[in-house]
Amino acid sequence: MALTTRSFKLDLYLEHIEEAAFLYEQCIALRRQADFAWRRLEDFEARLEAHLDALVIGGPLALELCERRAHEGEPGEVFAAVSVFCRHQRATEFGRSLRALTEAEQAHRDALAAALARELPPGWVEHCGSALQRHEPALQQTLLDVTALRRLPLSASILTAPLGEHAGCCSAAARALARLRDPASQPLLTKLAGHASPQVRIEALAGLLALGAPEALAQAGTYALQEPRALILLSLAAGPGALDILLTALQQASTSGTAALALGLFGDLRAVRPLLNALRNEVLAAHAAWALYLITGAPLFGEEFVPEPMEADERFSHETHAVQEHGAADDRGDGRPFGTRQRLLSRSVAAWNDWLGANAARFEAGRRYRLGRLAGPASVLETLSEPQLPDSVRQAAAEEARIRYDCDLPFESSLPVRHQVRALRGLARWLEQHQARFNAGRWYFAGRELP
């Protein structure tokens, strides 16, 4: 059968949307890799952009395919399709995608939110504010996530939205208000801080801290031993007196991993010895190593082989038999195990002790440190620029800018590299104007030095 021009083009556009979907998922997976430098995502994002461009210039036929895949496709295809709708400003197709959110899986909602965070036309912002007034939890939560990521000026709409007691909507609203930092939002955040859901309470607490509410500091200490996220907030807001709470949390199995990272962000040298001890705990070792690196900046990186166990459905029957009956290890067929070599921080207590002994003169007791230097607003920029820090740590540093130094920083580690770089340039300009106000190595809250 002869191939028609229409069929040929549809096949071509289908290939573009499938490749875009693959790259969307690939970027998500790469962000989770322990040794992946965030700037390397730019190459993958450029390839993704090329496929989106091809769909945009594909005209009506490409739009027809995008509309179909927006409702039937995988999350990555939803991301690509909604991106195209936004670039063409196709409100009708976009509206259908929003209406489908009610029955969509969370991964599809996340994909739609990711597309809107990158591509939402300015002319649609007001419509998003109006849509928040509809008591449709899936729709509200998605639009609130976009508001947070894009800093959409919709705080007034959030304050009047019928959120009810829905935990997902309330936590998303608090998260958005924390980024918008509208003083008028403090009463709602205070109310949400008493919500039945721990997730809502902690996000509301983050919002109150971002507004500089002093009572939120005490609340952070109260929640810290119960909610891991509160430990991070405490480390980003409190003064040196909070160290005992963080060290207690390090001893609790339910909070120990987060407590280690919180101690690293906190920057108190008194945490170094407990973190060295935590290196001996296999469960805590990786967290403790990152925490020590955050405080000291010790470049104790090295290559390690990290095994990758096979899933049961990936094995041939004889391989499954060998594993189940004889305890054989999965390998490539030549005796070499599956896995990759990764650049990881050392978890050797001896290596850290040697480095600390050789560099002790660089540190002064009673001061706060980040990456081996006295901590201050400039260390936020250094943390965000660090090529290999986990996304969670870099995102916490962006919160630190708001909470400790009263700096509005529109940074999200989940956004494309070019957006992140733009935010870092903005922070550099802010530092030129405001850095002189701060004493390096001291603890701050809401731009004011803590005793």
Image: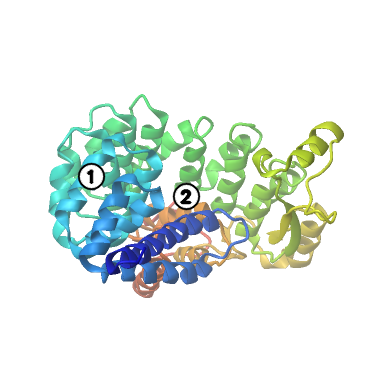
Q: Amino acid at mark 1?
A: Leu
For the residues labelled 2 and 1, the Cα–Cα distance comes to: 36 Å
Q: Position of residue 58 (x, y in %)?
A: 27, 69
Residue at image mark 2: 236
In the rendered structure, find residue 98 and report the number of the disc placed on it.
1
Which corner quadrant of the image does residue 14 belong to? bottom left
Which quarter shows the N terminus? bottom left
Which residue: 87% across, 35% down? 326
Q: Tell me: residue 438, above or below residue 146.
A: below
Binning the other alpha carbons within 10 Å of mark 2 as few (below 14), some (14 to 19) or many (20 upward) gives many
User: In the rendering, at what x and y percent does residue 203 appear?
Assistant: 37, 39
Q: Nearer the viewer, mark 2 or mark 1?
A: 1
The answer to whether 439 is drawn above or below residue 70 in the figure is below
Relative vertical location of residue 269 with respect to residue 185 in this rendering, above or below: below
Determine if residue 46 is in view.
yes
Residue 445 visible in the snapshot: no
Q: Residue at x 52, y 57 (%)?
A: 31
Instruction: Indicate how the structure is coloured in the image.
Output: rainbow
Q: Amino acid at mark 2?
A: Leu
Q: Is residue 300 left or right of residue 122?
A: right
User: How many callouts does the rendering have?
Assistant: 2
Label 1 SS:
helix
